[in-house]
Amino acid sequence: MTIYLDNQATTRIDPAVIAAMLPMMDLYYANPGSTSHQAGRLVGEMVQDAMERMAVRFGASCDEMIVTSGATESNNLALFGVALHPKQKRRSIVSLVTEHRALLDPLAKLEKLGFEVIRLPVLPNGHPQAGTVELDRLADALTENTALVSMMMANNEIGTVQPISEIANLCRRFSVPLHTDASQAVGRLPIDVNSLGVDLLSFSAHKFYGPKGIGGLYVRQSPTPVLLQPQILGGGQQGNLRSGTLNSVGIVGMAKALDLVCQELDFQMTTQEQLRNLLWRLLNDRIDGLSLNGPTLNAENRALRLVNNLNVSFPKVEGQSLMLECPELAVSSGSACTSAEPLPSHVLMAIGLSADQARSSLRFGLGRFTTESEIRTAAEWLGDAHAKLVPFVA
């Protein structure tokens, strides 16, 4: 029996999403760009319907939605697209030290191309809002030379939810577009691009029970259009901003997944928060000296952290050792994109943990299919594993 608590890395495809995708592979397989025949036009109409439904879910218009292969591509298109546009004269970009590699690596590339990249620190562990940017520091970093601000809406390791609306207000003072990587937020938080005030927003379907290899980028068109330099050239699809045959199977699946998570968002937020808090209590009952990484779990601070996220440092035992002792428990010691690297989590180090504390940490990501029985069993397995390992390191 595998207990899957790694929903920050990816989620299981919902059976209803699979059902929506299967006909697109068997019956409606024509190229949606083949408008010269009925089969292509029919698929094109199905894709258009899916795009319009997704746009409504984001509070956007259909022409503001670009389909990509996922949030990594979306982040690259947002950063390089803004920075390298021929009309771009500004040369500074502001972000956070706790961003995902899908943002940090493109930023490093832009730095090599001559851009100034300002990576702001975040509030330290122990603070109720650990991992959050200080707005005064952001305000000080913004100048007439700032081309873009890019900040993750919800952190993939410690669940910190940034005050995006307040960040957007600061950006507007300097007429600076705001990009947010909302990979972890879509399907876990209410998303309305106009209420948030964002200009660019990245997302991936596999984070909200949809298929892998499909995602999107919202690009504001009104009142001031965001200008992007295309990064993929070819057939001129999607207004020349992202060429390539549209992934009709993935688009239909992504739209169905988004419909489902939005329809039951409030219920799932409440359920996953209760299970997350139960896991924290059970682990504390079994193991002395646990420490919480990231924002507090107090009810009044609910908006500060993803309700499905728990990141814990275990005393005296490395997280990898615990994982080896619990082979049927799917959890993570950090971001899925860096799990093969020996270095401790840059996110945990950025909020003040030592290298040893970071290595002793595990991330738990609950999801729609997580049950109370699984939470209780996982806590029991980890408690037993910790008790078994401590004597060997004491």
Image (cartoon, grey):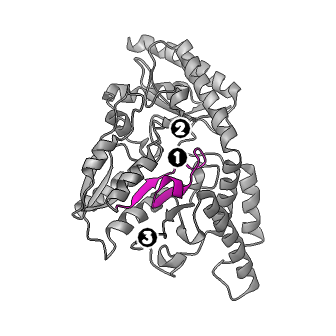
Among numbered discs 1 and 2, the one appearing first in the sequence = 1
Measuring from the top left, give residue 180's x and y in whole percent: 44, 54
How many C-alpha atoms fall within 10 Å of the one at disc 3: few (<14), some, or many (≥20)?
Answer: few
Q: CA distance from mark 3 to mark 2?
A: 31 Å
Disc 3 and disc 2 in contact, CB within 8 angstroms: no
Q: Nearer the viewer, residue 26 or 309?
A: 309
Q: Given the image, on which type of amino acid does mark 3 rest?
A: Thr
Q: Check disc 2 and report the residue beneath it.
A: 306
- State which mark lies toward you, 3 or 1: 3
The part of the chain drawn in magenta is 176-203
Disc 1 and disc 2 in contact, CB within 8 angstroms: yes
Measuring from the top left, give residue 243's x and y in whole percent: 50, 76
Q: Does residue 181 sit above or below 69 in this rendering?
A: above
Q: Given the image, on which type of amino acid does mark 2 rest?
A: Leu
Query: Which quadrant of the figure has residue 53?
Result: bottom right
Q: Nearer the viewer, residue 32 or 394?
A: 32
Q: Is residue 140 visible?
A: yes
Which quadrant does the C terminus fall into? top left
Q: Is residue 358 magenta?
A: no
18 relative position to 155: left or right: right
Among numbered discs 3 and 1, the one appearing first in the sequence = 1
Residue sitting at x 53%, y 28%:
300
Q: Given the image, on which type of amino acid does mark 1 rest?
A: Gln
Residue sitting at x 68%, y 31%:
1
Measuring from the top left, give residue 205's x and y in whole percent: 59, 55
Q: Secondary structure at mark 1?
A: loop
Q: Check disc 3 and report the residue beneath it.
A: 224
Q: Check disc 1 and report the residue beneath it.
A: 184
Q: Is residue 197 magenta?
A: yes
Q: Secondary structure at mark 2?
A: loop
